Amino acid sequence: MLALVTVLGASLVSAHGDEDMAHMGSTGTLPEEAKFFHWPEEPMGWALRVHIALCLIGFVALLPIALVMEMARHRYHPLVQLSGAVIGFSGIVFGWINGHLDNTYARFGWFMLCLLIAQTAANLAFATRVLKRSSVNEPVYRVIGLALLVFTYMAMVLGVIRYLNLCSQGHLGQCISHFARGSALIMGSVVFLVFMRVFGPIMLEIRRPPEFYVSLIMMTVGLIGTFTEHNFFQSVDNAQESWSHKDLQHTMIGISWFAGGLLGVLMTARSHPRFRTPIPSIIFIATGISMIIHQQDLIMSSHVHFFFGAAQVLLGLSTICEITLVASGFVKDRGEPQLFQYVPLFFMCASGMALMGANRDMVFFLINSGIDISTYALILLSFCFVIVFYFYLLVDLYHWLTGTAPSKYNALDDEDLDTSNSSWLRREEELRRKRHSTSSQTSTLNHSESSEHVTPHTFEV
């Protein structure tokens, strides 16, 4: 299936190769705003290089490792967190030295600095016994660490947007829509990777199958996409332009995601974790097909949307195979997740990367930089491999520090379903007992009433 999609994509690229080179070589056929999106003419200064290196070491390497060590209650966690905070703060300072402080990325750095100071202060308070760990302050400390990890990702995205001058020239709404929905897909793949490798049995305790939460995210993402495609956040003067076919299609995709997510939530709201639904997969396949046949005014944009659509179709098909053929839920008769269960996670991450990279400003940047679709697709797939490798490694580090197995999947048979290990099963058992008790009382009452009306037979000798 993957080979078939690759062949189709290659034929599409070869069929339009000359037109692509014409678009890349000539600026006369491009819109006027396309000239603003190109590789920066000024070379990257030494301060910016040091800023990137220190932030990668501090925020991407050491602080997430410190978060995993905190989850594992490792004794060297305070030292690693303090080292990451110092290096991360130094990276922020070098970003200020580089200049250009009047932009969103620089302002977001102040917010990151506040989170970093709060986390470091709590770490020092715990380490010096000034503040004792409790059931209140310890979860708050861990939430700050998780928030810092999420906002680190947002800072990296804002840094790329700032350096390449994206999300400008009246395309802010479309840019927000692409980056918000793409980031939701990437974060969803990461969350399911962690849940699948660490919290498998907990899926029995949360009362609902994974598709419930996927449908909930789809509702939110669809709602965002519905109101951000047609310059909803622009001023009144700029928002009065006519609707294009792209605005109509993307807005309808947002509506379909909201409606399909609503259906998925309704179907799985009271379901057992094993009773999964293919509704999110059907939405992915429908979205992918619409993107594959979606024609743009630029050939490069059509190619990027084709890549995104292919990733969506593969995501939907692989998820259906995983639900119906590989697993009936997250708990199976095996010691660890099967290898095929990582395939939908990768395609979810790939579709998120392709969706973020399909915004109009990025397409103009690709054309002006002379980057073809095959190179761009390989770049996005490389980022996906790095993301999956990164979080897979963090989970392995957690298992190594805690001394647990790589996965905690338990064998679950029909006898286990009759136990009261989970709240869902407990509720079902209580309802079953009530129904049995009611039926027993009804049958006893009917028997007594029928015995009263029976006339006894007498026999004469």
Image (cartoon, rainbow, N blue to C red):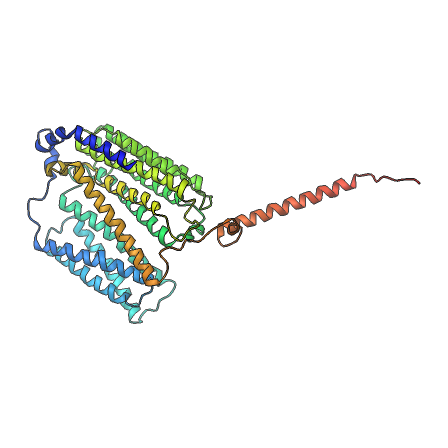
Vertical comparison of 345 with 30: above or below: below
| Left or right of 102 on screen, residue 199 | right
Task: Write down the quadrant of residue 293 in the picture.
Answer: top left
Vertical comparison of 5 with 122: above or below: above
Q: Residue at x 20, y 50 (%)?
A: 156
Task: Write down the quadrant of residue 296 in the picture.
Answer: top left
Q: Is residue 144 visible?
A: no
Q: Which quadrant is the N terminus positioned in?
A: top left
Of residues 301 and 129, the one drawn nearer to the viewer in this rendering: 301
Where is residue 389 shown, x and y percent of the image? 26, 51
Vertical comparison of 110 with 308: above or below: below
Q: Residue at x 18, y 32 (%)?
A: 13
Where is residue 391 shown, x and y percent of the image? 28, 53
Q: Which quadrant is the C terminus positioned in?
A: top right
| Left or right of 80 on screen, residue 330 | right
Give the residue at the far right of this rendering.
461
Where is residue 253 shown, x and y percent of the image? 31, 33
Of residues 69 and 389, the one drawn nearer to the viewer in this rendering: 389
| Left or right of 245 on screen, residue 29 | left
Instruction: Count the marks.
Output: 0
Where is residue 405 shown, x and y percent of the image? 37, 58
Of residues 26 and 373, the one drawn nearer to the viewer in this rendering: 373
Give the residue at the far left of this rendering.
42
Q: Is residue 439 visible?
A: yes
Task: Write down the quadrant of residue 161 in the picture.
Answer: top left
